[in-house]
Amino acid sequence: MRLDIPQELPRKRAPEAPRSAPPLEAGPLEQRRERLTNLRDERRMPNIPRPERKSEVSQPREQRDRTHRPPHDQPIERRVRRNEIPQTIVGLSLREEERKALAEIGRFRVVATHDLAESVYDGNRSQLQRDLRFLEQKGMVEVNAVNARHDGRRGKTERIEVVTLTREGRDAARRIGGLPEDQRIYAGIVKPREVEHDAQIYRAYRKHAEGIEQRGGTNLRVKLDFELKSDVQKAIYAARKAEPERDMAEIKKQVAQQFELPYIHDGIQIPDARIEYEMDQGSRSGHEDIEVLTAAYSPGHLRAKAQSGFNLYASSSDRSSLTARIEGDHHLIDNILEL
């Protein structure tokens, strides 16, 4: 059966409401400003300064840097002892032990830390290590571990910890070390292979200076061989320039007499150090020369030093090596003092 379904007549569409006009697009200048603003806030372009936060503005720049410093870079806290007035160098406070340590190191160029602990810190090595770390952070000293001399000795090589001044430390020692104005102060290591020997000069000085002070000597001043050699060479050069035809041997004898140094085997003998001092409240002055011997000394070199009249010192190990080397000259060993 077929059913006829009546179809609806087409309806007329209602008129649509007029559409609102699309918003006008921003021009190129406005779009560029908006993009730059977003980049400034999100990416912090280097050419556009970012406004500081309130927390940052309230703190000085130095304080913000100190706040974000890593823990291992934090400076060692200084603790001033009671009844102690610290000495200040450009905002840096130093205790009496630190000032004295700078002076002792500067006078002898290189000092072993264990000797420094005994002479300045009364054996308190932990306090010495803390002060050395502080002075090292401030760029005033350098602490190094060097190999001891072999000199034919067997066994494991010994390591010696020594300390020297930097240029900044030398300037500080000059200003607050309490040293005489004519006392020369050194910085840095000159001959790494002779560090052990040079460090023993300080130990020999301490032993010899104690006897000078017991006899009433005051205002002790130290002249190392560097300074003595420089003075002798200048005097020889001046004499040769004044009298070019004069015999060199005569010039050397005159210069040796001028500096009260021995002239042996056609050469001027120069000690490792000369200790100058005053007696009777400065009315008299004197000096004594010290020499540190090592197992590396040849028999001829040793005899020349013994004939010079220097006060000879040597460590126990070096003394035993020298004894075996000059068996026929035992009288030379009798005059060598042990460090």
Image (cartoon, grey):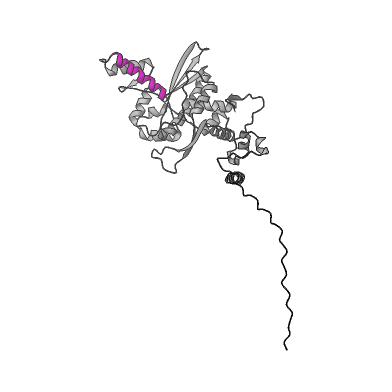
The N terminus, quarter of image? bottom right
Dominant secondary structure (helix, strand or loop) of the stretch shown in magenta: helix
Which corner quadrant of the image does residue 79 belong to?
A: top right
The residue located at (67%, 38%) in the rendering is 55
Q: Position of residue 81 (x, y in %)?
A: 65, 28
Query: Looking at the image, can residue 338 be seen?
Result: no
The residue located at (40%, 21%) in the rendering is 228
The residue located at (36%, 15%) in the rendering is 257
Magenta-colored stretch includes residue 223: no
Residue at the left extreme of this rendering: 245
Q: Nearer the viewer, residue 253 or 79?
A: 79
Q: Is residue 153 above or below residue 263?
A: below
Q: Which region of the structure is painted magenta?
A: 225-244
Q: Position of residue 259 (x, y in %)?
A: 38, 17
Residue at the top extreme of this rendering: 283
Query: Looking at the image, can residue 232 be seen?
Result: yes
Q: Nearer the viewer, residue 31 or 160?
A: 31
- Side (left or right) of 14 relative to 187: right
Q: Position of residue 100 (x, y in %)?
A: 55, 25
